[in-house]
Each structure stands twice: as structure tokens, then as C-alpha cells.
Amino acid sequence: MIDALVFPDTRDALFDLIDGAVHLGEPVRAVYQLPADDYGALQGPFPIALIYVTGGTRGFVDQVDRATIEVYAPGQDAERTLVSIAASIIGSDIETPSGFIDSVEADITAADVPYQSDTLNKATATFLVTSRPL
């Protein structure tokens, strides 16, 4: 029998920290998949934070995942909301219902990126999330 190391789910831990938290006076809705109508248009309420993990590295003691958060909101609120989210999740020794996270660090800071919409903007940032086995 082979013993395998099981780490907390980074995406779930970030979801726990972001979903429902109030930033710029509005509760943020965290999602794993963007909500769209029958025509593919993004559905509110906004702001929406899309969370996904694009891989990482595993050492002898810990694992570092690279997680990306995209925020969709009207106008400049997308980037400002993401900056606020970053300020609230960056830190060390973070307890969530999905598991303990050793640290969250900014890898790529929040920036407004092109998005095809007349009413919405998109901002994205990448974080390094370090955790140890459960």
C-alpha cells in the first residue's frame, strides 16, 4: 500500500475566504464557473470573482499552488474590488472550513485586462497559496 499526501483544496479555501465578503460596499459572489444566460452573456449580481488553480509545486513538506482570481464588475470597480480582495486574503496561518493554509502571497498584482463588454470590466491577479498535508 502506498501512502499519499492529501493537501487542502486551494480553490475551496479561497472560495471560503471570498464568497459573501463585502468589498467596496458590495458582497462578492465567488464562483468556479461563470454564470451565463442562454446567449452567453455574463449574469449578475456583480461583482463576481472567478477562482481557478493552474497548478503548482510540491516539496517534501508543503505544496505551493498558483491560483488566479478574476473579478467582473462595472467600470473601475473590477480592479478596485480585486485589490480589496487581495488585501483581505494575503497573509499567513489562515484557517478556513476547507483546511488550513500556511500563506497566501501575491504573485501577479491586480490589473484591469481587456474584456468585451460595454458595461463590465475584468481584473485579474495571481496568488501563491502554500499549504501542508492534512
Image (tube, grey):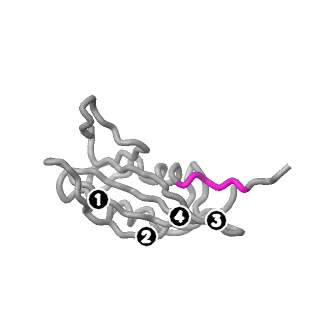
Residue 128's x, y, as percent? 50, 66
* Residue type, numbered disc 1: Ala
Residue positioned 55% across, 63% down in the render: 56
Disc 2 or 1, which lies upstream in sequence?
A: 2
Please tell me the numbered disc located at residue 101.
none
Separation of residues labelled 2 and 4 (CA atoms): 9 Å
Q: Earlier in the sequence, mark 4 or mark 3?
A: 3
Q: Which residue is mark 2?
A: 106
Separation of residues labelled 4 and 1 (CA atoms): 19 Å
Label 4 element class: strand
The amino acid beneath tag 3 is Arg
Examine the residues drawn in magenta and state their main secondary structure. loop
| Precedes in sequence: disc 2 or disc 4 | 2
| Residue 10 located left or right of residue 1 | left
* Lower sequence index among marks 4 and 1: 1
Mark 3 / mark 2, whichever is N-terminal: 3
Mark 3–mark 2 Cα distance, whole angstroms, equals 18 Å
- What residue does disc 3 label? 58
Say which of 39 and 101 sits in front: 39
Q: Give, as a single range, the part of the protein colored magenta.
A: 5-10
Residue that appears at 43% across and 70% down? 106
Left or right? Give the position of 81 relative to 63. Answer: left
| Residue ID for mark 1 | 123
Please, what secondary structure does the residue beneath circle 1 have? strand
Distance from Cα at disc 4 to Cα at disc 3 = 12 Å
Residue type at mark 4: give it.
Val
Label number found at residue 129: 4
Quarter holding the C terminus? Answer: bottom right
Label 2 and label 1: CA atoms lie apart by 14 Å
Rendered location of residue 25, percent (x, y): 26, 53
Q: In the image, is residue 6 part of the stretch drawn in magenta?
A: yes
